[in-house]
Image (cartoon, rainbow, N blue to C red):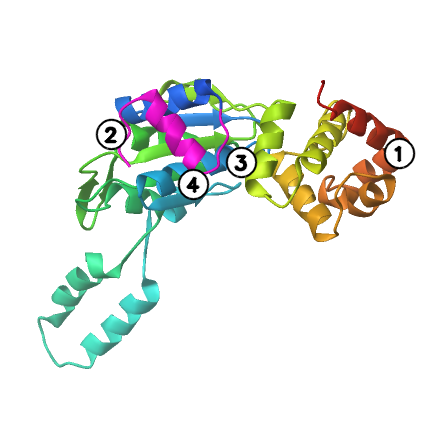
Amino acid sequence: MNVSSVDDVGGLLDSNRYMADRNLAVVIYLALSLCKPLFLEGEAGVGKTEVAKVLARGLGRRLIRLQCYEGLDAGHALYEWNYAKQILHIRLAESVADPNGRAATEREIFSPEFLIKRPLLQAIDAGTGDPPVLLIDEIDRADEEFEAFLLEVLSDFSITVPEIGTFSAASPPIVVLTSNRTREVHDALKRRCLYYWIDYPSLEREVAIVRAKVPAAGDELARQACAFVAGLRADSFYKHPGIAETVDWAAALVALGTTALDDRSAAETIGCVLKYQEDVRKARDSDLPARVDRARRAAVVPA
């Protein structure tokens, strides 16, 4: 699919059942047009990672994902040598009585044949086809040292392997970075990107998302589930439920044959929405039936 306007981006998102407002469509279009990385920040579960997946699917591009974590280093993100294969090659070469073989073997084991490309190098050395979508997920979980290294990579989209040479992207990949804001990402990295904060959706938008993802959920159940989750988000829980939890909960309610939210179904399935025992206990201790009643009333569409 070709994207030549903001409306095209909106259509791409809609066709892949990603319900976004126009502001997000605008920033995605600008990221594609200007070949700038897109930095998406927001609470966990609001659909940041899904943006990259939808772009890859909608544009027919390969998705390459780098999941960040504490201790992630350049080697795991860029490339590694296939040591087992190198050792096997050395042993096979040693069995051949060739006085000049040692130098040749040393050159051979540090050739592209023995190189294991990790996500960043895969995205940069992707060949001559359409560039892939590179998802750098939860960059806030990586160390600041890796963040500084990533800044250098994103500046020119080239990587040097001393034993082989420099790999440069024929066309820059579409880069999407996400952050749950567990820590502040350095301004220098954000300046390289177009920034967008994805917030929790409005009730109507979340209902549309649930209906798209769980078609078997009727409008009444979808609205009640979304209204109930909105009420949880307004309270001081340790971890507020994201859109993914709402969708999973709606699917669970449908699987149980529930057509309208009630006290029993809410109590039996609360673990689909809240994932910490302290939050589950708090929800139950704070009069769960009253929460259900408020959700049912908030879900009523005005005449």
Q: Does residue 91 sit above or below 267 in this rendering?
A: below
**Image location of residue 162, percent across then percent down:** 21, 46
**Residue 134 magenta-drawn?**
no
Q: Which mark is residue 289?
A: 1
The residue pinned by badge 3 equals 141
Drawn side of residue 223 relative to residue 160, left or right: right
Label 4 vs label 2: CA separation?
24 Å
The residue pinned by badge 4 equals 53
| In this view, the mark in front (4 or 3) | 4
Q: Which residues are magenta?
A: 1-20
Q: Pick whichever of labels 4 and 3 is earlier in the sequence.
A: 4
Label 1 vs label 2: CA separation?
57 Å
**Image location of residue 137, percent across then percent down:** 47, 38
| Residue occupying image coordinates x 59% and y 43% | 215
**Type of residue at label 1?**
Pro
Q: Does residue 79 sit above or below 281 in this rendering?
A: below
Helix, strand or loop for disc 2: helix
The residue pinned by badge 2 equals 156
